[in-house]
Amino acid sequence: MLRTLEERDIRFVRLWFTDVLGTLKSVSVAPAELESAFEEGMGIDGSAIEGFARVSESDMVAMPDPTTFQVFPFEGGASGESARIFCDILLPDGSAAWADPRHVLRRMLAKAAEKGFTFYTHPEIEFFLVQDGPLDGSVPIPVDGGGYFDHTTHSVARDFRRQAVLALERIGISVEFSHHEVAPGQQEIDLRYADALTTADNIMTFRHVVKEVALSQGVRATFMPKPYTDQPGSGMHTHLSLFEGERNAFYDSEDPLKLSKTGRAFIAGLLVHAREYTAVTNQWVNSYKRLFPLQLPDRITESPAFVSWGALNRSALVRVPAFGKPGSARVEVRSIDSATNPYLAFAVMLGAGLKGIEEGYELPPGAEDDVWSLSPQERKAMGYEALPENLAEAIDVMSKSELIPEVLGEHVFDFFLRNKRQEWEQYRREVTPYERQRYLGTL
């Protein structure tokens, strides 16, 4: 690695880490300082990072993870190429910081490993491309008028997806495929499956790369779950699987759906605890506008707002895709959005699934109907409970959970609830353009 830095004349190495809310942070160091950083880490002020530490305990250490070293050749130019390394956050005594989202996920992966499992994830990441402009709350202008799978031609962000995919693959992030999504300006890029920690690192890198490529083309990429009232939102449907060595633990050749008892219990765990972890997988006020949109006859939303599962059913919260090979057995969680903290989201979904396996949860019958098309009475009769309908309800349900604090750790759990309560209070006090438009002239 040090040889690569010298040979390619790389002047800056960025040490990356993530706060509790999923915001990417970085410290730049000169290559000459990197060797000591690997030995001793880089001191940071944890009190300045969302959720890391109080002022009285602010000293923390960013310890580079050498397995994540990557040169960013597309960021070259007059200043030369740059490189990045993800860091684990440690306390001054060398122990792991409980507030580090990477550590939260590592703990859950270690728990899965104790049971003989390796956890793999594969995300389908949706986002919007909009014309660059003021961030004053006005409705953004999409870069195109395309729809689902359209081959769009436009003057701005020309061939954006090709440039983004090339940039990702140049830094070792494998892309399965990409296409235009349902709404104008909406894109989807699917990453190839990998172990959950690698995938979470890749998602953080993906967001950075996509935004950089967009800016280079004079537009803006946003992972906001629901930028438009009358268009679908951006989700991050995520495929999950457990392996025991080389064997897919979700596969059973004798089952009608080829789904093993382990796979069924894992899905049951995802369903039983779905309402409890929704505040993590859908952590913003805006997330619930995507989950509970205005249902329009000419719009495809596929937003899974009710606790159900099904084979091939895209209205279900958890879907079992058709798979041709034993190694491809997996389940897909469709509620999660692309603005989540991937480390925490993967941790709580894994925790819920493992709980289902540990406790032997029974999987209820699968949903065969379009769950959205059912009446509230029909959904209630069939046992399809709604996810929390807003952030306030989500944090209330999460606050009563026994599983989620166990997965996140008390520090992250408490900070997350405090932060999200503040966000809801700020939102609840805000007088919106909708209210002024509806009431100012008539009341």
Image (cartoon, grey):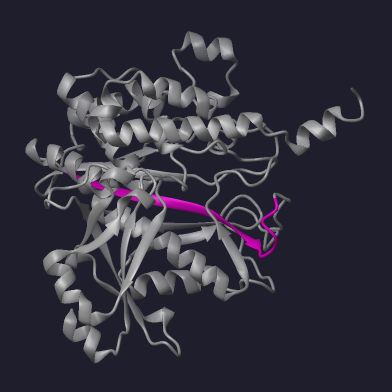
The number of numbered badges drawn on the structure is 0
Which percent across, then down, holds residue 41? Answer: 18, 64
**Vertical order, 48 against 209 (above or below):** above
**Vertical order, 320 against 160 (above or below):** above
Instruction: Check the image and name the residue furthest to the front.
Output: 56
Which percent across, then down, holds residue 171? Answer: 33, 72
Q: Is residue 97 left or right of residue 213?
A: left
The residue closer to the viewer here, 383 or 285, is 285
Which percent across, then down, holds residue 76? Answer: 42, 84
**Residue at x-position 62% and y-position 68%:** 219
The residue closer to the viewer here, 418 or 441, is 418
Residue 195 shows in this picture: no
**Vertical order, 260 against 123 (above or below):** above
Secondary structure, magenta segment, majority class: strand
**197 in magenta:** no
The residue closer to the viewer here, 375 or 196, is 196
**121 in magenta:** yes
- Image quadrant assignment for residue 169: bottom left
**Residue at x-position 78% and y-position 31%:** 435
Q: Is residue 226 left or right of residue 327?
A: right
Which percent across, then down, holds residue 276? Answer: 37, 25
The residue closer to the viewer here, 396 or 45, is 45
**Residue at x-position 60% and y-position 43%:** 226
- Image quadrant assignment for residue 383: top left
Residue 22 shows in this picture: yes
**Residue at x-position 36% and y-position 83%:** 81
Q: Is residue 6 left or right of residue 346?
A: left
